[in-house]
Amino acid sequence: MTATSDQSVSDAVTAGAHATEIARSGASNLRGTAGGGADPARVSAVVGAALEGIRAAIRDHEVTYEEFDAFKQWLIAVSDTGEWPLFLDVYLEFEVEKVAAATQQGSIGTILGPFWLDGQAQLDSPATLPMRDDEPGTPMILAGQVTATDGTPLAGAKVDIWHTDSDGWYSGFAAKPPAGNLRGVVRCDDQGRFEIHTRKPAPYTIPLDGPTGQMTQAAGWSPWRPAHIHLLVTAPGHRTLTSQLFFTGDPYLGNDVASADKPELTLDPQPTGNGDEVRADRDFVLEPE
Ligand code: BEZ
Ligand code: FE
């Protein structure tokens, strides 16, 4: 399939500026405390290793002054378009997530990405996500139970869910869907169960008109993400699970530009018999804090 701008998540400056604003505010820093008080030895080790990786690329590939100048222009464009969160989440977050996952019990997670938004509709399960009257796409139910690692059902658990519409657009980052579309925070019942009615999302490309997408295409890499549903599963006293769920048969599985797909996170929704509606069941296990 060929990428077209119609299937891109948004235009670079719109999505980039908003993602930068959120990252700058610290609102999307859900898994750690940001900045400050860094140990000089650690700065030296980590920054030194990163710089040496770039120096090695220059030496090994005999980078020219023309290429060095093009790199400077590209870095300036990443800043000008606000694409740092996008670039970092596409090309580096999955490695940070692997480090975090090494100490996480319970369900497997993956990256957050740059498109989470705070302050969405608070809903009680069973819930239907906010959507347009004529929301296109396959009606889908996602249902399951949130438990602790010892099997205790987690009353009070919440499932914060967001995903694109069936054309690959995120509300809040693209002009087409209205604010809050296909986003919500669903409170589970007293057994930690949830049932969420939504529409099946679509694969999308990262913005192709900005420096991240242009570099991706210049390298001949695919700019696509397989269709996915983002989730933050929370419960008082438990470590938050950040995850995404994918779909069997998606042509972009195994070739995700953000390297975030994992076989354990694939859903195989089945027809419910109610029109073209499908249903997928998935439980989540949270680790006590
Ligand atoms: C996403 O999960 O939506 C995403 C992750 C990284 C970069 C771009 C998008
Ligand atoms: Fe996404």
Image (cartoon, grey):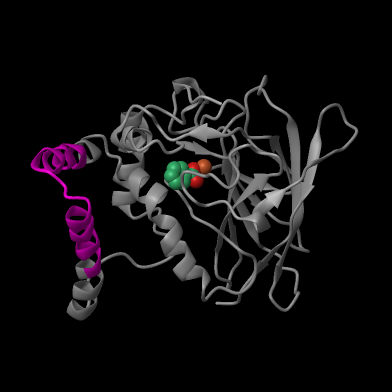
Residue 93: x percent and y percent? Answer: 41, 56
| Residue 117 appears anywhere in the view | no
Residue 218 relative to residue 280: left or right: left
Quarter occupied by residue 153: bottom right
Q: Quadrant of the C terminus?
A: bottom right
Residue 9: x percent and y percent? Answer: 46, 31
Quarter occupied by residue 115: top left
Residue 145 on the magenta span: no
Q: At 36% across and 34% down in the image, what residue appears?
A: 213
The residue lying toward the viewer, choosing from 171 and 92, is: 92
Residue 227: x percent and y percent? Answer: 60, 38
Q: Quadrant of the N terminus?
A: top right
Q: Which residues are magenta?
A: 49-76
**Residue at the extreme left of the image, as rendered:** 65
Residue 76 relative to residue 12: left or right: left
The residue lying toward the viewer, choosing from 226 and 111, is: 226
Residue 177 against residue 231 in the figure, above or below:
above
Residue 11 relative to residue 185: left or right: left
Q: At 48% across and 66% down in the image, what residue appears?
A: 98
Residue 48: x percent and y percent? Answer: 19, 69
